[in-house]
Image (spheres, rainbow, N blue to C red):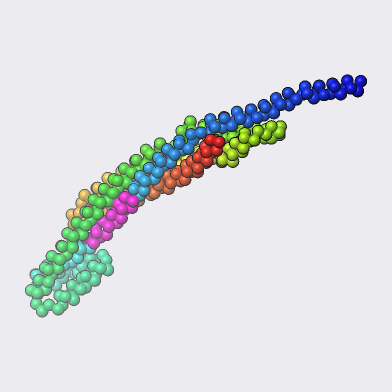
Amino acid sequence: NMGYFNMKKIALIFGLLPLVAHAETDATSALNETINVVRAQCSGISAKMDNIKKMAGIGTAVNAVGTATGVGGVASGVVKWYKDKDTLESIAEKKAVDLILQELKEKKQLSAENQELLQKIKTISPKLEKNLSDLAADLDKESSDDKKISTLEQRKLDIQKDIDKSQKQSTAAGNARTALFAVDTATNVAGAVVSSKTVADEDLVEQIKKCTESIDLLRKARARAQFEDDTDLKSMDISKKILEKCSEYEYVNVQQINNLAKGAMVTNSVGAVSGTVATITSAIGNNKKVSDIQSTQEFKKYNGTNVASNVLGGVTTAASLTGTALNATQIKEAKKIINISQECEEALQW
């Protein structure tokens, strides 16, 4: 009976062996199948991301040009403002010389009204007050009225040269401002278009999602193979390498790239609108000479137009600068994913 019992026990063990072998084969097979799924889901991401990086690079370059031209435009606007100020001071100085010259030619003392006007003219700027004080000192040195008149006439000619020069420089600066703001506006338009295309499409977002899901399945399949002691060394090595290199996808936020693209597009769009207005305002503000202005109110309007153009140009420049920063951040984020994808795809080739 004991021999019979042992024979049955041996038969039972041998009968179970195929089942054990079958279970081990299932674990290895599941691991290999999961490796193939990961290969299918995680391949080709680097190429798609590389295109996004290139587009973000184009956006960065475009916005950088816009920033530079915008800064140049604002600088030109500031130059124009100073040249207009110089022109205004020269016009005031010429008016003061005219008053003195008129009274001198008529052999009269300055009237109380003209004396008051002369004092007002002197208060326009410290530079103008000094010029008029120097002129008075020069006149005191002259021995005759004729020489005084000659000195005043020469001073008028010199002042007119200053007026012509500063107005010419103002016009040149204004034209440069208009042209540079137009370029900055164009770059903001181009930046908005580029940013609208610098996005991860739904297919790529879905692929990265499926890739991370397949990596999670691989982790579980490998754990099962280890638990069941079905350790096919090659499959275990391949799965280990894939998990080491591809698990980083689980920390990737591809939507961040799209958020940055949206931000750049909105910013550039705002810059395009403000740039258009700045360009038009600049052209209007440069359409008149200071010497042609007849009243204080008219000058305030003229000056306000030019200041508005400079401010709007500053908004446009800021938009270009922000767009540059957003595109640069996109490149940084894209590079992260590209590095992960390249290392992952190398591991998938095992």
Query: Residue 125, percent across and down?
Result: 27, 66
Res 262 seen here:
no
Quadrant showing the C terminus: top right
Work out which residue is located at the far right of the displayed protein and give it.
1
Residue 129 on the magenta span = no
* Residue visible at 69% across and 35% down in the picture: 226
Q: Nearer the viewer, residue 233 or 318?
A: 233
Instruction: Compare residues 3 and 168 and report the one nearer the observer.
Output: 3
Q: Residue at x 35, y 43 (%)?
A: 188
Seen from the viewer's position, the closer of residues 183 and 172 is: 183
Residue 281: x and y in percent read 28, 47
Residue 84: within the magenta? Answer: yes
The residues colored magenta run 68-88
**Which SS does the magenta portion mostly show?**
helix
Using the image, determine if residue 92 lies above or below residue 298: below
On screen, residue 102 versus residue 243, left or right, reads left
Residue nearest the observer in this picture, 88 or 215: 215
Query: Is 12 placed above or below 298 here?
Result: above
Q: Residue at x 32, y 46 (%)?
A: 184
